[in-house]
């Protein structure tokens, strides 16, 4: 049984990695490789022409900039709201705290599609269509993030905060100096999730943006139109460019997350 676990893990890894590998490989295909029989996994003559065309024949760079800006600002605001909210629900006492927390968490049961019409009507009434705030507005409150951070903060003894308050430490300083460093693993993980969620969103940016200059890359990718004549190369190149920020973020933060988790659970 123990021998089957590495084999199964390897197979699942290959299943996950193969689409990424093929997308990157196909982005270097010349036109003829897409109609070759049998189908090819590697380009016969690698070319960068697909990348050049994906940028020169579309506003891909503008779309990518809009997505990166929206994802970055949205993630910062979302994590700030979640951290402050989780701190308040964990360490502070105020009337109706438990009821309010239950109501916020209960919104997780509402399917996003059921709220999309009401959200759009609100954003339109506030005249936030075709704005970055309109794109990121519905992502700012994340009940899942709030719940996970609250549960993580509850593992920290309240005696630490009481001792810090006695020594004259403010809530802001206690949060910044003690709580955030020991919660680095969960915060980084949730930040990566927030960034990828906002960056990869398609339906909401499509609804709240009408001007091409405000389109995000997920919407812009459907506007490339190269696949109509079986010229898939520029689309694969654009998808590869689209994947790059997420892959770089994951690779850059993979080791810090592992180190932080190891330190937390081993006590080193």
Image: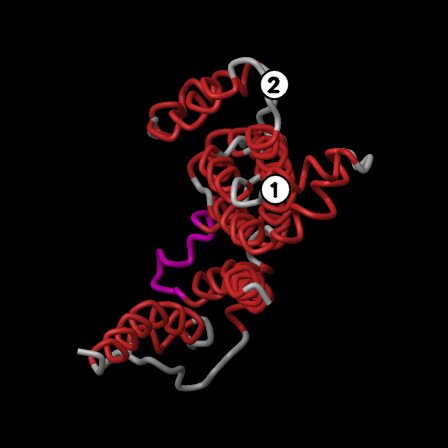
Please check the rendered image and state whether residue 76 is part of the magenta-colored stretch, yes or no.
no
Residue that badge 2 annotates: 127
Which type of secondary structure does the marked residue at label 1 adopt? helix
**Magenta stretch secondary structure, dominant:** loop
Would residue 171 be found to the left or right of residue 9 on screen? right
11 or 131, nearer to the observer:
11
Q: Mark 2 falls on what kind of element?
A: loop
Q: Return the residue nearer the eye: 18 or 28.
A: 18
Q: Nearer the viewer, residue 62 or 97?
A: 97
Vertical placement of residue 58 versus 70, above or below: below
Where is residue 199? Give x, y as percent.
52, 47
Q: Tell me the crowding category of disc 1: few under 14, some 14 to 19, or many 20 or more residues within 10 angstroms, Cα based.
A: many
Residue 201 seen from this side? yes
Q: Is residue 189 above or below residue 114?
A: below
Query: Which residue is rendered at x = 46% and y = 30% of the image?
Result: 207
Residue 244 in view in this figure: no
* Span of residues in magenta: 222-232
> Which label number is shown at residue 8?
none
Identify the residue position indicated by label 1 in the image.
70
Q: Is residue 229 magenta?
A: yes
Please indicate whether residue 258 sits to the left or right of residue 213 in the image.
Answer: left
User: Residue 170, position in %: x, y?
Assistant: 78, 34
């Amino acid at each position: 049984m123990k021998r089957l676990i590495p084999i199964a893990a390897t197979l699942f890894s290959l299943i996950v990695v193969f689409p990424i590998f093929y997308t990157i490989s196909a982005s270097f295909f010349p036109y003829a490789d897409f109609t070759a029989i049998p189908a090819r996994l590697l380009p016969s003559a690698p070319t960068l022409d697909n990348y050049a065309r994906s940028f020169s024949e579309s506003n891909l760079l503008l779309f990518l900039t809009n997505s990166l800006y929206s994802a970055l600002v949205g993630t910062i605001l979302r994590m700030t709201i979640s951290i402050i909210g989780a701190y308040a629900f964990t360490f502070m006492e105020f009337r109706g705290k438990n009821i309010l927390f239950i109501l916020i968490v209960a919104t997780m049961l509402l399917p996003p599609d059921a709220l999309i019409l009401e959200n759009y009507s609100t954003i339109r009434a506030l005249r936030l269509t075709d704005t970055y705030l309109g794109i990121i507005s519905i992502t700012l409150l994340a009940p899942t993030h709030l719940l996970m951070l609250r549960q993580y903060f509850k593992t920290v003894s309240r005696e630490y905060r009481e001792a810090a308050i006695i020594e004259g430490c403010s809530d802001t300083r206690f949060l910044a100096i003690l709580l955030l460093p020991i919660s680095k693993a969960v915060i980084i993980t949730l930040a990566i999730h927030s960034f990828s969620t906002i960056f990869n969103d398609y339906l909401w940016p499509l609804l709240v943006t009408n001007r091409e200059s405000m389109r995000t890359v997920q919407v812009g990718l459907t506007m490339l139109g190269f696949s109509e004549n079986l010229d898939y190369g520029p689309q694969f190149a654009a998808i590869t460019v689209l994947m790059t920020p997420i892959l770089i973020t994951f690779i850059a933060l993979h080791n810090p997350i592992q180190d932080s988790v190891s330190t937390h659970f081993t006590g080193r």
